[in-house]
Amino acid sequence: KQWNFIQKAALTTSCPSLLYKDQDTIKKILRDSYNNNVTNIIIDSKVGFKKILYTLNYGKKISNISNADIQLYPKSTCILSNFNIKYSIMEVLKPRVQLRSGAYIFIDSVEALTIIDVNSGSFNQAANSREAILKTNCLAASEIAYQLQLRNINGIIIIDFIDMQLESNKKKLFLEMKKETYRDRAKTVIFPLTQLGLMQITRQ
């Protein structure tokens, strides 16, 4: 609907003119990142505080409304320093991401291609059953789907999961990845595992 409006505006307005302007930063963050898992929102701007209250409670522009606690940051110290935001950003963007099973994933991006390797780590592949390997791969799929959004990774993505022999388990992993990326706002296309055990994804 928005695109149709832009096309009509382009035909009826003289150049140069602004056809469309995206929402401001606060509304964009609420639109793209706000969901039922958010329990607290803290902001150090009175104007921004009022804007959040209006958008969530009166604007009705956010579909997943929850009872998040919205707070105005009262201290004079920098909010980014107080919550170690810069440190957290550096931590979450490290190439290695540890999984609970002892395995980990390694993310390496070059230009329009991203390689993700699921490494068994302390999770001993030889000593574990097929079910345990499938469970670890599914855990990795969930974390990978989260990391794609967190890092805003797009283009072509190749994932090398821990090797599985059964075709039925490969299909389960494929369906799990599709389920985990279902809520991704970016258009994501997932292809079944290749003969080499690689999963190919494209993300806008």
Image (cartoon, rainbow, N blue to C red):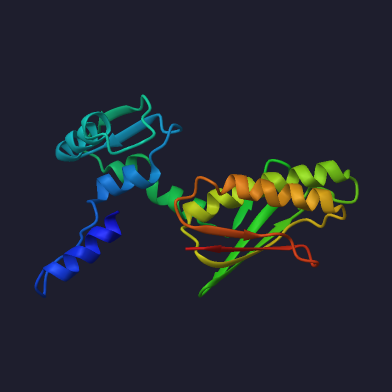
Residue found at x 51% / y 75%: 111
Picture quadrant of residue 39: top left
For this rendering, which residue is in front, 150 or 175?
175
Q: For residue 98, say whether it is visible.
A: no
Give the quarter of the figure containing the N terminus.
bottom left
Residue 17's x, y, as percent? 12, 69
**Image side of residue 40 versus residue 106, left or right:** left
Q: For residue 168, say whether it is visible.
A: yes
Residue 14's x, y, as percent? 9, 73
Picture quadrant of residue 128: top right
**Image side of residue 187 versus residue 34, left or right:** right
**Image side of residue 199 versus residue 35, left or right:** right
Q: Measured along the vertical axis of the image, is residue 76 above or below residue 16?
A: above
**Image side of residue 12 versus residue 155, left or right:** left
Residue found at x 46% / y 33%: 37
Residue 12's x, y, as percent? 12, 68
Picture quadrant of residue 100: top right
For this rendering, which residue is in front, 199 or 4?
4
State the residue lying farthest toward the left. 14
Residue 157's x, y, as percent? 59, 65
Total number of numbered discs in the rendering: 0
Q: Measured along the vertical axis of the image, is residue 168 above or below residue 100?
A: below
For this rendering, which residue is in front, 112 or 80?
112
